[in-house]
């Protein structure tokens, strides 16, 4: 069970609640959604009935723990969160464009991608150096060398760097180089990794699992939030469907449901959601129109020779064209997006 407390209780009032809980032989784990304390009852079984806990002065509500996501909940937080990362604000008025290659490959490729991202009005420069490839015989990423190259190019262009972390072992290294961590679809339920990221104070883009329900997605976010890291950004990247015509099926309605349920920002990745270059821009426009907080788009200067995900990569000029369209579209849905120079 979860207890949400009234906001702005004094230290004395909090102590009184704690004393009452001790009398009832209940153990609690303390956390918070913004200013509102949320205490999680950790003693298994034998808990007093919810009605009894609800009568303790200062307790606002008693919620079932199973399936609950108090820290991600919009209702409990009361307003959408804006995640700040340097000059970037995700979840506010600005529509955010994150772009870059699927994988970090060469200095020339990174240079071309950084230029395109910047010209298109993107501040967040993505690129994987630890790649979660389906086959162990395909390019696995440049590892540390890729992180170093990514950082150097991002800094030179004044961009923020986002990179995927695959496991706990690499977390300190990726966290040292990247401004924003990415947890990929395949790792959405890697709970030890989520817990370890929860202990960092670093923005994290959490991608929806290939076949995760909305609730599983929010509970994965809850793992990070409950560790104390409040800087979680969700990313809808399509879910596995029965139809092999597309790589995935872009679940835009789910973005709207998420925005109803959670205060966390939600980006959309139309690249992995379709797997097809010609569908990326139309789905990106659809995501912006539907109320997503931004996009994650893969680009490559020569997609035919890309080491990973070439068929879905936009060319630099295609990203620029999309940015022009987003500049027209954003104000229609109450957002700001810079017009490319
Ligand atoms: C990626 O962003 O390159 C990636 C591997 O995406 P996903 O985890 O959504 O498959
Ligand atoms: Mn990719």
Image: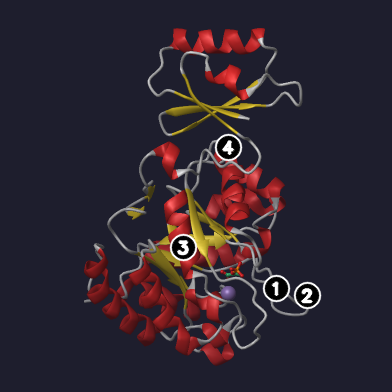
Residue denoted by label 4: 226
Residue denoted by label 3: 255
Q: Is mark 3 within 8 Å of ligand 1?
A: no
Query: How many other residues sit within 10 Å of disc 1, few (<14), some (14-19) or many (≥20)?
Result: few
Whether residue 152 is visible here, answered yes or no, is no
Q: Quadrant of ligand 1?
A: bottom right
Mark 3 vs mark 2: in front = 3
Q: Is mark 1 within 8 Å of ligand 1?
A: no
Picture quarter with the N terminus = top right
Image coordinates of residue 301 in percent, x first then y, are: 46, 86
Task: Decide: is 271 above or below 15.
Answer: below
Image coordinates of residue 247 in percent, x first then y, are: 61, 81
Image coordinates of residue 96 in percent, x first then y, are: 36, 63
Q: Earlier in the sequence, mark 4 or mark 3?
A: 4
Report the Cα–Cα distance between label 3 and label 2: 32 Å
Q: Earlier in the sequence, mark 4 or mark 2?
A: 2
Report the Cα–Cα distance between label 4 and label 3: 22 Å
* Callout 4–callout 2 Cβ contact below 8 Å: no
Residue denoted by label 1: 133
Residue denoted by label 2: 136
* Callout 1–callout 2 Cβ contact below 8 Å: yes
């Amino acid at each position: 069970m979860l207890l949400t407390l009234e906001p702005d209780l004094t230290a004395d009032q909090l102590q009184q609640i704690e004393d009452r809980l001790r009398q009832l032989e209940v153990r609690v784990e303390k956390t918070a959604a913004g200013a509102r304390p949320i205490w999680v009852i950790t003693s298994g079984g034998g808990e007093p009935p919810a009605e009894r806990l609800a009568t303790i002065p200062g307790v606002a509500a008693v919620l079932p723990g199973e399936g609950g996501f108090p820290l991600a909940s919009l209702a409990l937080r009361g307003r959408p969160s804006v995640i700040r990362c340097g000059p970037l604000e995700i979840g506010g008025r600005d529509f955010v464009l994150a772009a870059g290659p699927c994988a970090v490959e060469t200095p020339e490729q990174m240079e071309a991608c950084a230029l395109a991202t910047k010209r298109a009005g993107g501040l967040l420069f993505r690129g994987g150096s630890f790649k979660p490839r389906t086959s162990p015989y395909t390019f696995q990423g440049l590892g540390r060398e890729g992180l170093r190259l990514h950082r150097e190019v991002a800094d030179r262009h004044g961009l923020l760097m986002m990179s995927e972390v695959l496991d706990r072992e690499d977390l300190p290294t990726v966290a040292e180089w990247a401004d924003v961590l990415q947890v990929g679809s395949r790792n959405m339920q890697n709970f030890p990794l989520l817990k370890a990221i929860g202990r960092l104070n670093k923005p994290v883009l959490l991608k929806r699992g290939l076949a995760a329900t909305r609730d599983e997605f929010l509970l994965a976010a809850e793992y990070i939030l409950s560790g104390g890291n409040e800087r979680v950004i969700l990313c809808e990247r399509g879910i596995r469907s029965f139809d092999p015509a597309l790589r995935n099926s872009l679940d835009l309605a789910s973005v709207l449901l998420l925005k109803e349920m959670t205060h966390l920002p939600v980006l959309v990745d139309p690249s992995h959601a379709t797997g097809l270059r010609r569908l990326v821009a139309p789905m990106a426009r659809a995501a912006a129109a539907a109320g997503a907080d931004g996009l994650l788009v893969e680009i490559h200067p020569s997609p035919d020779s890309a080491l990973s995900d070439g068929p879905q990569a936009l060319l630099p000029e295609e990203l620029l064209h999309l940015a022009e369209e987003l500049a027209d579209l954003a104000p229609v849905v109450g957002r700001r997006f810079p017009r490319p120079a």
